Image: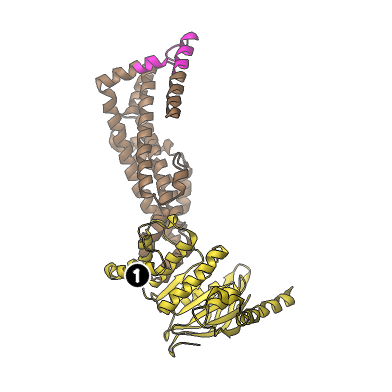
Chain colours: A yellow, B brown
Amino acid sequence: MARTADEVIAVKGLRKEYQTSRGTLLALEGIDFKVGGGEFVAIVGPSGCGKSTLLKLLAGLLPATAGDVLLRGTPVNGPRRDVGFVFQSPVLFPWRTVLDNVLLPADVQRLNRGNALPRALELLGLVGLSGFEQRYPWELSGGMQQRVAITRALIHNPAMLLMDEPFGALDALTREAMNLELQRIWLDRRETVVFVTHSIAEAAFLADRVLVMTPRPGRLLDRIDVALPRPRALDLMAAPEFGAIVRRIRAHFDARAAIEG
Amino acid sequence: MRNQALRALLLVASLALWEVAVRALRVPAFILPPPSEIGAALVRGAATGIYLRHFCVTLAETLLGFALGSTIAFALGTALAASPRLEYFLYPYIVMFQSIPKVALAPLVVIWFGLGLTSKVVSAALIAFFPLLVNTIVGLRSADEDRIDLMRSLGATQLQIFRMLRLPSALSFIMAGLEVAVVFSLVGAIVAEFVGSEAGLGMLIQSRNFSMDVAGEFAVLFILGLMGLLLNTALAAVRRRVLFWDPSQKAAASGASMKGSL
């Protein structure tokens, strides 16, 4: 359910091989998908299925072996400035204050700090971190640190937001709270998001569309539209229509487990 | 407060034990003088100003050598960390040079640079060089991969990654290297003074050794200890300031790791 007609990301026939000492390792094969403007797409798959590799290809951090990634119609050939990346760990710089961490993209891209500052303060307010601007990352909890990382990824108005299991390192309760938080931010800002996770429930709860990936080599097995109304509450996870989506995703992994088991 | 009193008491007790043992066992003063004689030698030398003069000479040699050695080590370490090619060509020489005990070069350095300040500075710089070189290379390469990816994803240049990420990440290694280097510089200066010099605490030790003034020698050793402590404290203060954000600093507040060799 692409909200707007313009597509932000188009991936065509993407393939990635790694050269290792034991020969060529095929990480990804035949990846095709599109993400529309303002769409929230989740990619779900087991560990080692190449999800992180896919995100790094989207960000231009790794070169593709074959195939194309187009961002707003132009091919991604290397790192670009209009991408926001959120990693599994917050990846904050401990020698910078919260505010300076959020302003890192502005510093790197030599944007005017004066222009970025009001936006940084507004975003920090949006994620509930007003008053923590001058604190250092090690003074914050894991969930707060990850919110700083999300804020940093949004500061330079990226064309797409790439999130690599951003809540994987958090405890279950904090994780649920962060899912709600992320939904709230997304409803407010309507960024184009590609969100990688190995949690089926998290993918179904957050996304407009879920892409299911198989491991080694990573292939796209299924695409599932999640046509549930927003804002979604945590209670939704008990609803039958949510359960149906989760079962459909899980069936792919159960089937594979039966074959491989 | 109570611990400090205990500390002082322990010091006084050990000095008293030393004094009593030396007198009771009739140890000759040219083997081991009692603390009272060392104290008297300290007061004598302090009154004439002889210690202050030589203290300043050795301190200047040490600091200049430290500055020279660390500057070159940091620059070369940065170049080697940035360029695997350069490392490939230079590394064998570095390893070879590192395995030579640098104090063994002191006689040569004195022949080349004379009896004055220069030879002491060069000797100090030679010894101070390695701990910082090694730590700079390791430190600059220690930057977290995810942080590098983050910087790259923002379109950062190599120079920006160096300035904003690699250098701050390397600071704890560099500071540990500097702390070792400053103490090593002092060693280099003293050794070069032993080989041949006109002034300095090392020269003073040697001249008192020749005249069998062992109490006077101990007094100079005490002053050397003070200088080492002073240098170490100054660097520890700098480290606490620049690494305020590093949680490992609180644990490692005392005692830098010894890296590199003399």
Of residue B71 and residue A116, the one placed in the foreground of this image is: A116
- Where's the C terminus of chain B, which quadrant? top left
Q: Is residue A11 above or below residue B229?
A: below
Which residue has dot 1 on it? Answer: A122
Where residue A53 sits, quadrant-wise, is bottom right
| SS majority, magenta | helix
Of residue B168 and residue A184, the one placed in the foreground of this image is: A184
Of residue B232 and residue B95, the one placed in the foreground of this image is: B232
Is residue A33 shown left or right of residue A119?
right
Q: Amino acid at mark 1?
A: Glu
The image position of residue B227, as x and y in percent, is 35, 32
The chain to which mark 1 is attached is A
Q: Residue furthest bottom?
A: A5
The image position of residue B72, as x and y in percent, is 35, 49
| Magenta stretch contains residue B29 | yes
| Magenta stretch contains residue A88 | no
- Residue displayed at 51% across by 80% down: A41
Of residue B69 and residue A111, the one placed in the foreground of this image is: A111
Q: Is residue B165 above or below residue B36?
A: below
Span highlighted in magenta in the image? B15-39
Could you tell me how many numbered marks the image carries? Answer: 1
Q: Residues within 10 Å of mark 1 (few under 14, many from 20)?
A: some
